[in-house]
Amino acid sequence: MKIAAFDLEIAKEIPNDVLDWQTISPLGITCASVAHSDSETPSVWQGVPQMTREECRELVGGLQDLVSRGYVLVTWNGCSFDFAVLAEESGMVSECAELAMNHVDLMLIVTFTKGWFLGLQKALEGAKVEGKVKSVQLSDGSTLKGMHGSKAPALWERGEYEAVLTYLNGDVVQLLRLVEIIQRDAAISWISGTGNRQRVAVKKLLTVRECFDIPEPDVSWMDDPPTRQQFIRWMEP
């Protein structure tokens, strides 16, 4: 199976108190990356100050081309974020919806099985994979520690393109490694906040469409559990 791990970075910062990013959209896209299971070098799309609509449409076409060539697209929370942002920026809503529904969103497998969200860092740590990039070198030679995706928009605006791309490429490369381990172990594993090992069995990499066949968990104990509809509400009927 040929895997293509996909992720993107946005142009607008999302304030910590914003619970729904769509209330402050459009977010814009500065860059996107795909790590391929049969190539050592990720493919990158980028634009300054951000990707134009035409460049975003080219990105959609690039992802469609990968699918036509037999790659399985994989993301972490791509269904409700990356593809939703790309749909808005490209104007290709139906095309992005088709890509989203037929790709593998690893976080969605966990959320639909357990009823709660799980961060990529937790899954990487559970698989004993090198975590997300935590420090990047800036153009003046200094090192920025504590790197996080929330810092990417401001860094890109300052012209620190290589720093952002280093962070982004690290995400897709590690995501690709995570997929390999999930296929090997037939599970997604992590350590909970209380120190207990958790796991979700993954007999096969389910597409988003197939995830809707997962039996719904009991979330009656949760105050505000995520609904399945919220992941696809951006799609056209």
Image (cartoon, grey):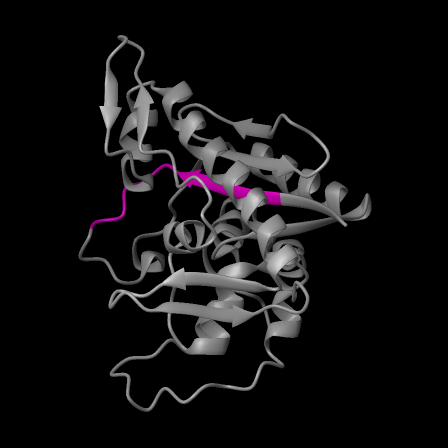
Residue shown at 66% from the left, 69% from the top: 203
Foreground pick, 25 / 141: 141
32 is higher (above) or lower (below) than 81: above
Q: Residue furthest left?
A: 17
Left of 18 or right of it: where is 171? Answer: right
Q: Residue furthest right?
A: 69
Find out whether residue 11 is within the magenta segment. Answer: yes
Left of 6 or right of it: where is 198? Answer: left
Find out whether residue 199 is within the magenta segment. Answer: no
How many numbered discs?
A: 0
185 is higher (above) or lower (below) than 180: below
Foreground pick, 178 / 53: 178
Quadrant of the image containing the C terminus: bottom right
Residue shown at 28% from the left, 33% from the top: 147
Left of 89 or right of it: where is 28? Answer: left
110 is higher (above) or lower (below) than 57: below
Residue shown at 31% from the left, 11% from the top: 139
> Where are the magenta residues, as a range?
5-15
* Residue 193 image point, x, y percent: 26, 65
Q: Is residue 67 visible?
A: yes
* Residue 7 image point, x, y percent: 51, 43
* Residue 68 image point, x, y percent: 81, 47
129 is higher (above) or lower (below) than 141: below
